[in-house]
Image: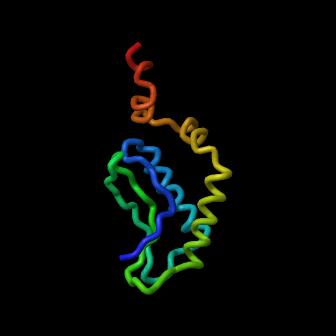
Amino acid sequence: MRYETIESGSVNNEYDVANLEIIKVVILSTCGEPPAGCFFDLRLNDHDCGEYYELCLCWEYEETIYHNYLENAMECFHALNDNLDWQGLWDAFPSDNWIANTYPEELDA
C-alpha cells in the first residue's frame, strides 16, 4: 500500500491527534471524499525519537498516484494551518485532561 503524509503529531499530546482529525474533516468537507481506492488513515509510527501519528492519504495500487486530490488536500491543509490559531482554539475549549497535562503545578496548589 502506498501513502503520502499530510501532517504528523505527537502521540503524547492529545491535541496533536485531535488536530489531525480536524484537518481530516476540513479536507473532506473542502475537497470531497477521496477517489475510489483511496482513504485517509491515522498511522502510528515508531521512531528513534518516539512514537507519532501521521494523517496519510493511502491507496492500494502501487502504480496509481492521486496527484490532483493529494495536491488539493495539501493546499487545503496549508491554508487551514496558516490561518487557524491552533493554540487559541484549544485555549478556548480546554478539557480537564488537557489542563492536568499542561498545567500540573496549578493542580498541586
The x and y percentages for residue 85 are 63, 44
Residue drawn at x 66%, y 58% is 79
- The number of discs equals 0
- The answer to whether 42 is drawn above or below residue 2 in the figure is above
Instruction: Determine the residue located farthest toward the front in the rendered image.
Output: 48
The x and y percentages for residue 84 are 64, 49
- The answer to whether 42 is drawn above or below residue 34 in the figure is above
- The answer to whether 57 is drawn above or below residue 13 in the figure is below
- The answer to whether 37 is drawn above or below residue 82 in the figure is below
Instruction: Determine the residue located farthest toward the bottom in the rendered image.
Output: 63
The x and y percentages for residue 25 are 52, 62
Residue drawn at x 46%, y 44% is 15
Q: Quadrant of the N terminus?
A: bottom left
Q: Nearer the viewer, residue 33 or 78?
A: 78
Residue drawn at x 57%, y 76% is 69
Residue drawn at x 37%, y 61% is 43
Left or right for 97, reference 71:
left
Q: How is the image coloured?
A: rainbow
Q: Quadrant of the C terminus?
A: top left
The x and y percentages for residue 18 are 46, 50
